[in-house]
Amino acid sequence: MVHVKQCLILAAGNGTRMRAVSASLPKPLVEFRGRPILEHVIGRAQEAHIDEFVVVVGYRGDLIREWFESRWTGKAHFTWVENAEYHKPNGISALKARNALRGNFLLLMADHLFAAATVKKLVQERLAPGEVILAVDPKIDHVFDIDDATKVRRVGNLIVDIGKEIEPYDALDTGMFGCGPALFDELEAANKEGNCSLSDGMRRLARQGRLRGLEIGDAQWHDMDTPEALAHADAESPVDA
């Protein structure tokens, strides 16, 4: 992953559970401490020297593009990918971006706040051919909404299962991935079987021993997909989280 320059961000979903505070805005434009959540995500990735962003938009994607085209003042380069099937699982959004990516890349969610140090650590990892690395958090008792969290089970540093309903589990999926082109092959295969969430693709990689967990240590992260989660992140996270 060293010297990786591209970051794929999934920002296409409906954001239905955030509607109480978002009104008609897409979730990535909901403000957190005075700035859109997506702006925080991009800023954290830039601290790891990422300068090319492939952003998959769907629900009210025009508003996201307009905001960045009119108000973004940074030096990042954006490639916008439209996903008209944004009501489908998020693996479809990732597949839509396949042709816009070259080699290894960072994969992030548009509604996950994280520490810049975590991304720096992730991009410094050596990615083996065909492998995906998932940043995981073993601090299970510290998560805001454990029922909604995606869990992982590990054997050593390999993830052997992933999903919201798995038992037992020993860490949580933080939504930060180091990926190569092999991810798309597994998502395509999962899609042919009628299942195409990111977790479906990751589960296929796990069965082949190609999904590695990287612990984030003491770093914080927040999945901000509800008003309550947004408020919790604001109360718990330091300014530079």
Image (cartoon, rainbow, N blue to C red):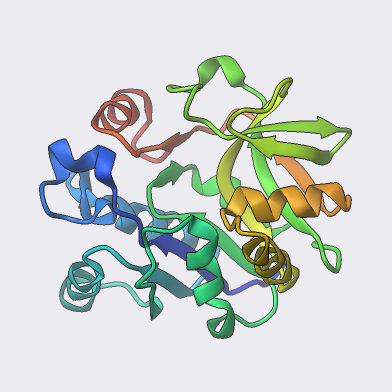
Using the image, determine if residue 168 lies above or below residue 174.
above
Using the image, determine if residue 17 lies above or below residue 3.
above
**Residue nearest the observer in this picture, 201 or 232:** 201
- Residue at horizontal 22 percent and vertical 56 percent from the top: 26
- Residue at horizontal 31 percent and vertical 72 percent from the top: 74
Query: Can you tell which quarter of the image residue 135 is in?
Result: top right
Marker count (numbered): 0
- Residue at horizontal 56 percent and vertical 60 percent from the top: 107
Can I make out residue 216 in this image?
no
Image location (x, y in percent) of residue 70? 15, 76
Q: Going by the picture, which residue comes out furthest to the top?
A: 141
Query: Can you tell which quarter of the image residue 222 is in?
Result: top left
Image quarter (top left, top right, bottom left or bottom right) of the C terminus: top left
Image location (x, y in percent) of residue 162? 69, 38
**Residue nearest the observer in this picture, 87 or 134:** 87
- Residue at horizontal 76 percent and vertical 37 percent from the top: 161
Q: Is residue 167 left or right of residue 154?
A: left
Image location (x, y in percent) of residue 136? 66, 37
Can I make out residue 160 in this image?
yes
Q: Is residue 121 left or right of residue 149?
A: right
Using the image, determine if residue 168 lies above or below residue 204.
above
Q: Is residue 235 left or right of residue 134?
A: left
Image location (x, y in percent) of residue 102? 64, 82
Image quarter (top left, top right, bottom left or bottom right) of the N terminus: bottom right
Q: Is residue 197 left or right of residue 10?
A: right
Q: Going by the picture, which residue comes out furthest to the left?
A: 23
Query: Can you tell which quarter of the image residue 131 is in?
Result: bottom right
